[in-house]
Structures are given as structure tokens and as C-alpha cells.
Image (cartoon, grey):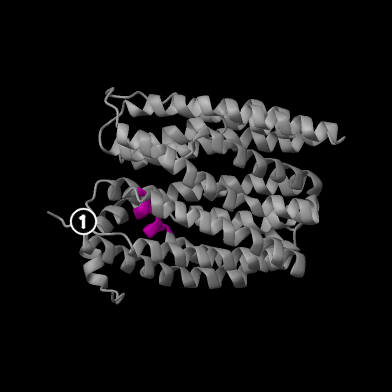
Amino acid sequence: MSLKINLKSILRDNSINYTLKNTSLAIVGKTIIFIFGFLLMKAFSHFTSKETIGLYNYVIAVLTIISITTLPGTTSALVRAISNGKEGSFLHMTNARLRGGIFAFILSFCIGIFYIIKGNNTIGYVFFVGALCTPFIDTLSEMAFAYWQGKKNFKKSIYLSIIYQILFTIPSILVLIFIKKTILLISLIFLFQALSGFLIYKTISTENKERDIESENFSLHLTIVNGLHTIGMTIDRIIIWHLFGSISLAIYTFAIIPITKLEQLIPIEFLSLPHLSNQIKITNNKKDINEKTLLLFIILIPFILFGWFIAPLFYKIIFPNFPESIHLFRILLLLPLCAFFSLPKTALIAWKQQEKLYYLEFFSILIKIPTLIFFGLKFGMTGIAEGLVISRIIEGIMIVYLFNKVKIKNEN
């Protein structure tokens, strides 16, 4: 298949016009969220120690993996259900996620007991608080965002995302300024995040009780896929914690989080999943996605080069206490280039290619964990950053391969 880009045909395409129409609003909203996220990072870097930052991020990484029991793949399935007018699935899927939160509570509580037995009371008590909050942190807010995304009311979804970020960020910054006890500090941040999600959830009022059983069943497959992906995306923090300790994790955190925030500014899945969920798989769709994937890669290159050159000034102004993060940040800047793989992966989700998604996520973990450990032990923190980039590139190649293996349905 030729990947020669016909720019005029792309711009005339209805799907790309649909995306472009909403992209500016999405980017503005995500930029505001991006700014508040950086304000919170700034507060962490200025008002807390590197040990506390490392501890917080280690606990967050473990709780993120534990939260797989809350069925996070349900959000993507809900987008599919709502986009097809089946709003009765909203309450059913939300209740399923909350029931799964019981297991998250038990696991987090057990980990807390484990650390207390080992004599590390601070981490143990933080996990106790995490046991109470994890079933609700992100769960309720994610379902609300998915509801409006499925209705293609991107304006409301983005506005609610901004409100959620403000409700969570401002009190958290005040806590960082005035409270120095690690357990209380982290506990209050967890609590603010859970309460903010609850307030966002209360904005939803469904219009019908019709359920999309197919999407509900598919949510289990997506949860397994999402769970594997979550492990792959957070395991680096856990490896660093155990290999190098909390201070190294703090340094790595201030290198990787700006990259993560940059990737979140690219609203590919947010805009394309509802649209692709309503499309029949035809040869032209597949060809267009390949072309747009390559076009996105080309567009991102100058931004990455700009970030590489401006990194020292950025850290001097924004995070002056973390000059050690600059070198890692420059290596990790290659990761946003891999964001162009999100479009074919979103198509695999929209087209319910669960077998291929399983292959992808299992393959990614099998590549990532040994790569990070090997490069970390051999080259230290630099090796961790390099291993992460290498594993992400290999994953991207696999995404494209699996996407192009999808069997096409004819339009009629």
C-alpha cells in the first residue's frame, strides 16, 4: 500500500473535517488542563522534598495498577454505547466499576498492612487512605467525560474536564503550601481528587434506558487490554523505585510528566473514537488512517526539535530544583512522536479488534519490562529513559502491523 500523502484529499475527507472542527476547542481545553497540571507540579517541586515526591509517585503507580479492578476499559465501551444512543448502559457500567472498586480497596489495604509489617508506616498508612479513595478516584469523572464524548458534545466534556482539574488542583496546591506531614498531605490530595470526580459525575442525567449489551460485554475485553496497557505505562516508576529509590523516581517524574502532558495535548482518541465507532470498515478508511498517521508524524517533528533546544531554559524557569531531569527529558522527547500511533490503535478499539489488542498489549509488556530492567541495570537512569523510548517504538511498529492486518468489510 502506498503511503504517499494526498493532502487535498485528506482535507476534503469528511472524517478529517469532523476532527478539525473540534480540534481547536479540544486543544484549548487540554491546554488549560495542561497549565493547571503544571501549576500542581510546580507546587510539588517548590514546597515538598524529593523523597515525598518519589513516595507519592510510587504510591500513585501502584494504585493505578490496582485500579484495573475498577474496569477502566468500560469508559471506551461507554463511548461506543452512547454514540449509538444506548444511554441505559451508563448506569449499568458505572455500577460495575464501583463494584470492582471493592477489590481495589482490599488490595490497597493489604499492601498497606504489608508495609506496616515491614516497618514502613508512612507508606502503609498512605495505602490505607488509597484503599478508601481508589474506587472513586477518576472512576466517576471518567464515566462522565465518556458520556459527553459519546454524545459528541465535546464542548461540555472539555468544560467539565477543566472544572474537574480546577477543583482538584487549587486545594491540592494549598495543601502543598501549608501542610508538611507526608501522610496528611497525600491523603488530602487523594480526597480532593475523589470529591472532584463525584461532583462531575452528578452532571449526568440519561435520556433513555436502552442498553447496548454488545458494548457492555466488549467492556471486559477492553478492561483487560486497558489493564495490560496500564501496567505497561506505570511499571517504569515501580522499577525505578526498587532499583534506584525515591529521589531518582522524583527526578524521573519531572522528566516524564511534562512529556505525558504534551501527549495529552494531542486529542486523537478523544475526537476519533466516537466517529470511528459509527463507521463501517472499508478500504478507503484504512488507507486514510495510514495517511493521516504519517502526516501527524511529520507535523510533530518540529515541535519535538523545539522542545529539545528549549529544555534547559524551561527547567531553569519552571523547575529550577530539578536540573538533573533535563537530560532524561531530552531523551524522552522522542515519545510524543509515537503519539501518531494512537489513530490506528483507536481504530482497533472502535472496530472491536479485541484479539489484536490482546496481542498488542501482551507484546508491549513482554518487551518493555525486560528492556527497562536491562538498560536500567546497565546504564542507570539514562538507560531507563532509552529503554522506554525503544520499547515504545517497537510497540508502535506492532500497532501499525496489526492495524494493517485487519480484514476489511465492504461498504455494502
The location of residue 21, given as percent across then percent down, is: 29, 53
Identify which residue, 137 or 70, lies in the foreground: 70
**Residue 13 quadrant:** bottom left
Residue 79 is inside the magenta segment:
no
| Whether residue 390 is situated above or below residue 262 in the rendered picture | below
Quadrant for the N terminus, please: bottom left
Q: Main secondary structure of the magenta part?
A: helix
What is the magenta range?
342-349
| Whether residue 89 is situated above or below residue 14 in the rendered picture | above
Report helix, strand or loop for mark 1.
Answer: loop
Query: Mark 1 packing: few (<14 Cα in 10 Å), some, or many (20+)?
Result: few
Which residue is label 1 attached to?
409
Residue occupying the point 38% across, 53% down: 346
Identify which residue, 211 or 58, lies in the foreground: 211
> Horizontally, is 223 left or right of 110 in the view?
left
The location of residue 20, given as percent across then percent down, is: 31, 56
Residue occupying the point 40% across, 66% down: 401
Identify which residue, 211 or 23, lies in the foreground: 211
Give the amino acid at mark 1.
Lys
